[in-house]
Amino acid sequence: MANSNLKNALIAFAAPLPSILFYLSFLHHHSAAAAVADHPLAPLWSWCYQHPLLLSNAIFFFNVDIVFWIIGLVQSCHWLIDPYWTVIPVLLAHYYATHPLLSSSYNVWRSRVAIGLTWAWSIRLTHSYFRRENWQWGAREDWRFDDMRKTYGKHWWWISFFAVYVSQQAFLIGITLPMYIIHLVDKPWNMWDSTATAVCLAGVVIAYFADTQLHDFVTGNSKLKEQGKPTVPTLENGLWKYSRHPNYFGEQLWWWGLAIFAWNLGHGWTCIGALINSMCLAYVTILVENRMLKQPYRAEAYRRYQKTTSVLIPWFKSSTEGKNDKSH
């Protein structure tokens, strides 16, 4: 177990090196290549300079979609994308902030605040991920991938390329588009930036406490099970008293807060990323709740919980169990 954990940790740290080294090489050589017209890599560096958004997609495709996919096939486990879900937005934020075409065209303070918030979000989610995984690297893959593996059988090897990686590219590049806009448009800080900051911070804080309460609940049930005592079927304390998925609510607040930054800069179209994320989380919510209802020891209690507690936005409990599920 220790050797496997160390091996996976080394893989995780080495996996993004190709894109990092390529980008650093681009930063070092693009100006020199532009000054020397017959430089052998001048066309490549010129293209990288002129197309920052396309370059981010190209790097993602070759390093994440292809390299991560190959690693997943070799290990028969697509675990690597999970911890990098918490890291890639930070890498993209710094990429946009340092790209030569963008580096002189944005408000420095907005950039610093947005990057600082992204680091806070990343640290919170990374901590939650490894705490859930008992501080192990690559101990398991997402249960949804495991379900798809069983569904698609022998075809999973190639379907996984699209289902796990290409889809994540569209997703992650899409929801971080506001970060691109933040480093594309120069506009003085205003009240909407303050609002966006407050929404982002609220999302990070709510998600942190919701995840911590869920972790304590799972840990407590594990101890009860070890002692041969009955476990608690549903978590209905703390934030979970007012929402069945307060962690998802906090995550939604974070991404919509980031979208407010871009909307304020005249690029409301980038909200499409947050919207798609909301739709995907709505679907995941259905999957999670169906999974809960398939567990005999908690099905009845969870049905009662559904009838009395808001599905997403925290709200007061319904006093009538027969009442339709709230959609606040």
Image: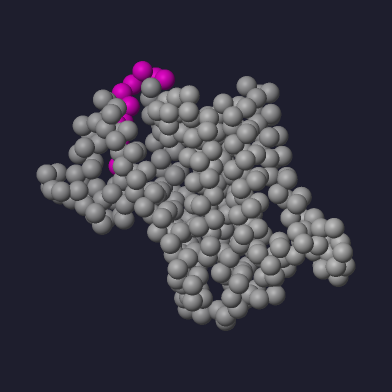
Q: Position of residue 122 (x, y in %)?
A: 56, 51
Magenta highlight on residue 239: no
Residue drawn where x is 21% and y is 37% of the image: 303
Q: Position of residue 12 (x, y in %)?
A: 66, 38
Screen quadrant of the N terminus: top right
* Magenta segment: 226-236
Residue drawn where x is 59% and y is 29% of the image: 73
Q: Position of residue 174 (x, y in %)?
A: 50, 57
Colouring chosen for the image of the structure: one colour
Magenta highlight on residue 228: yes
Does residue 195 lie above or below 312 as drawn?
below
- Majority SS type along the magenta span: loop
Does residue 174 lie above or below 133 as drawn?
below
Residue lying furthest top in this view? Answer: 228
Residue drawn where x is 85% and y is 58% of the image: 40
Residue lying furthest front in this view? Answer: 38
Q: Nearer the viewer, residue 298 or 154?
A: 154
Does residue 235 lie above or below 23 as drawn?
above
Q: Nearer the viewer, residue 163 or 82?
A: 163
Residue 37 appears in the picture as rendered? yes
Residue drawn where x is 43% and y is 31% of the image: 148
Number of numbered discs overlaid on the protein picture: 0
Q: Position of residue 254 (x, y in %)?
A: 46, 59
34 relative position to 160: left or right:
right
Screen quadrant of the C terminus: bottom left
Residue 134 location, quadrant: top right
Residue 135 appears in the picture as rendered? no
